[in-house]
Image (spheres, rainbow, N blue to C red):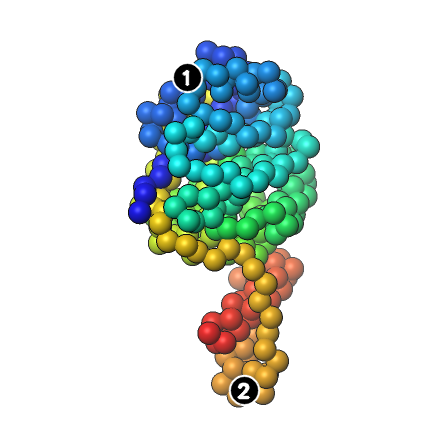
Amino acid sequence: MTNINLCTLNVNGIQNKEKGLRVIDWVKRNKCSIALLQETHLNEETRASLEKDTDFIFHCSHGTTASRGVAIGINKHADIEVINKFCDNDGRLILLNVKMDNVILSLVCLYAPNYRTDRNSFFKNVNNFIKENSIGITLVAGDFNEALKTLDRKSLNKNTKFSEPVNSLKVLMKNHNFIDIWRILHKSTQQFTWRRKDKTQASRIDLILIAKEFQSLVEYCKIKPALIKVTDHQGIVLNFKTGASERGNGYWKLNNSILKDIEYKNTINRVINQFENRIINNESSDIRLLWDNLKIEIRDESILYCK
């Protein structure tokens, strides 16, 4: 098995060569072979220049030289084969299917919009984008501009009310069985990846989401100070093992014969009753999210039962 370090960071523009080199130096000091970067502000000329002076090859979705742009950098000396690349036309989303040690990973780097309505539409697109293009174990990293829990936000203003994550992000995570790996490994820790310059607010909006079956390969996930003055974000470093083949996303069809199985029907009835109780107890005010979650839970229980 091989140990791989992967990192994500909002760099707030690396069209300036000196700053780009400082970012790559930070990546190398963290011994990362893969870097998922947001707000790169690169174009083809500055990308080629950065590749010439570093050990990394950059696969990009360009925004403008003043906004957006995402990139996945892969160390030239790493034994990582890029199978194919997919990206949007807006500098917010890129997916690489890569192969390492006979494991196929689908690496997704994203930079979500600042406005809530736009984010909701964006994550709906991400959901479909991954379904259409991912062929391996999926890992999504980037600046989500969303905190998943209240614990992931802090404000000096006691009257500040924090919003729930947009519904489409919750559905995205359910549909692809994603987990917030940093929170899984640091259950009650409060640590942030972004702060206002006046330090009145802070949040953990930079995330790495992984498919749940990938969790057993993860060694650690840490928030690391970027120490680059121009960005107000911190980075995240994920260490994981390779070496065992895993199945990627696929289609599963229900064997209709189990609908006559009393034990199976009792299992599904229990799932439905649990969701009915949640509605009665007002655990969620979003009936659409409960409906989506119920369907996912029924599917998961059905797959488990058939196995």
Identify the amino acid type marked 1.
Answer: Arg
Q: Secondary structure at mark 2?
A: loop
Label number found at residue 22:
1
The residue under label 2 is: 261
CB contact under 8 Å: marks 2 and 1: no
Q: Is residue 240 left or right of residue 42?
A: left
Q: Is residue 133 visible?
A: yes
Q: Nearer the viewer, residue 91 or 49?
A: 49
Mark 2 or mark 1: name the one nearer the start of the chain.
1
Q: Residue drawn at (57%, 48%), measured in percent from left and top? A: 134
Q: Nearer the viewer, residue 13 or 25?
A: 25
Q: Nearer the viewer, residue 44 or 195?
A: 44
| Residue 166 pos. (x, y %) | 60, 46
| Residue 232 pos. (x, y %) | 46, 23
| Residue 155 pos. (x, y %) | 46, 34
Relative to 291, say whether 37 is above or below. above
Identify the amino acid type marked 2.
Answer: Asp
